Image: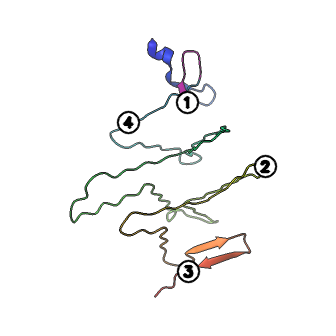
């Protein structure tokens, strides 16, 4: 058919591992193409990996060499409704809930809400710049760049290494 010759979505199951592969396909006989996959869902999209060893991984190998702007993941969450008088709507573009309170430990359990590791290089004649977090908050009646709320301990720790660091704690008044 014309659709098969034009390419589209190819679904394959590995004989060795049973893994399911969803892959876009170019024209007839070409195993990859530049086709997009768009999911339009009237409800939730849920990915539930295995309890142990099941991760959700997004991978992109960028090989460009000319002027470009690229991203692995773009989240666009637009709020367009009119919040009625006396009503409050709370929006979180990303919400992370990591609950370790029911984990029985004999050893140590370390929990991290966000772990950002960036590694740049210095080879070549060009320049690389790394920015771990770039926060731009503006346009509202009240703008807060970062809000850290906790009941005890250190609110902020800035570290060069394990020996050289500064800590900030808000006093309980």
Q: Left or right of 120: which side holds 106?
A: left
Q: Which residue is mark 3?
A: 169
Between marks 3 and 1 in the image, the one whose residue lies nearer the viewer: 3
User: Which residue is drawn at the image coordinates 64% and 72% (left, top)?
Assistant: 158
Estimate how packed mark 1 is, as few (under 14), some (14 to 19) or many (20 or more) residues with alpha carbons within 10 Å: few
Q: Position of residue 94 (x, y in %)?
A: 45, 55
**Residue 2, how many percent across, how many down?**
45, 13
- Asked whether the beta carbons under mark 3 and mark 1 sit within 8 Å of each other, the answer is no
Picture quadrant where residue 31 is located:
top right
- Numbered range of the magenta stretch: 20-31
Alpha carbons under labels 3 and 1: distance apart: 49 Å
What residue did someone put label 1 on? 21
Q: Is residue 68 above or below residue 157?
A: above
Which of labels 3 and 2 is toward the front? 2
Query: Badges 1 and 2: C-beta atoms under 8 Å apart?
Result: no
Report how far apart the C-alphas of labels 4 and 3 lie in the structure: 46 Å
Rounded to the nearest angstrom, the CA distance separating label 3 from label 2 is: 40 Å
Which residue in the protein does label 4 denote?
A: 40
Q: Is residue 31 above or below residue 141?
A: above
Q: Quadrant of the N terminus?
A: top left
Front position among marks 1 and 2:
2
Q: CA distance from mark 2 to mark 4?
A: 43 Å
Of residues 9 and 143, the one nearer the viewer is: 143
Local crowd size for mark 2, using a 10 Å CA cut-off: few (<14), some (14–19), many (≥20): few
Q: First in sequence, mark 1 or 4: give its number.
A: 1
The label on residue 123 is: 2
């Amino acid at each position: 058919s014309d659709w098969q010759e034009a390419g589209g979505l190819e679904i394959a199951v590995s004989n060795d591992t049973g893994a399911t592969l969803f892959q876009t396909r170019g024209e007839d006989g070409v195993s990859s193409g530049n086709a997009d996959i768009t999911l339009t869902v009237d409800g939730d999209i849920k990915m539930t990996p295995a309890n142990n060893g099941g991760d959700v991984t997004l991978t992109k190998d960028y090989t460009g060499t000319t002027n470009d702007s690229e991203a692995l993941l773009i989240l666009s969450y637009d709020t367009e409704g009119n919040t009625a008088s006396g009503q409050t709507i709370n929006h979180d573009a990303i919400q992370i809930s990591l609950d370790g309170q029911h984990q029985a430990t004999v050893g140590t359990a370390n929990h991290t809400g966000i772990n950002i590791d960036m590694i740049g290089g210095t080879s070549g004649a060009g320049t690389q710049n790394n920015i771990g977090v770039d926060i731009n908050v503006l346009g509202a009646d009240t703008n807060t760049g970062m809000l850290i709320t906790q009941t005890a301990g250190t609110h902020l720790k800035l570290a060069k290494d394990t020996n050289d660091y500064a800590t900030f704690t808000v006093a309980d008044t």
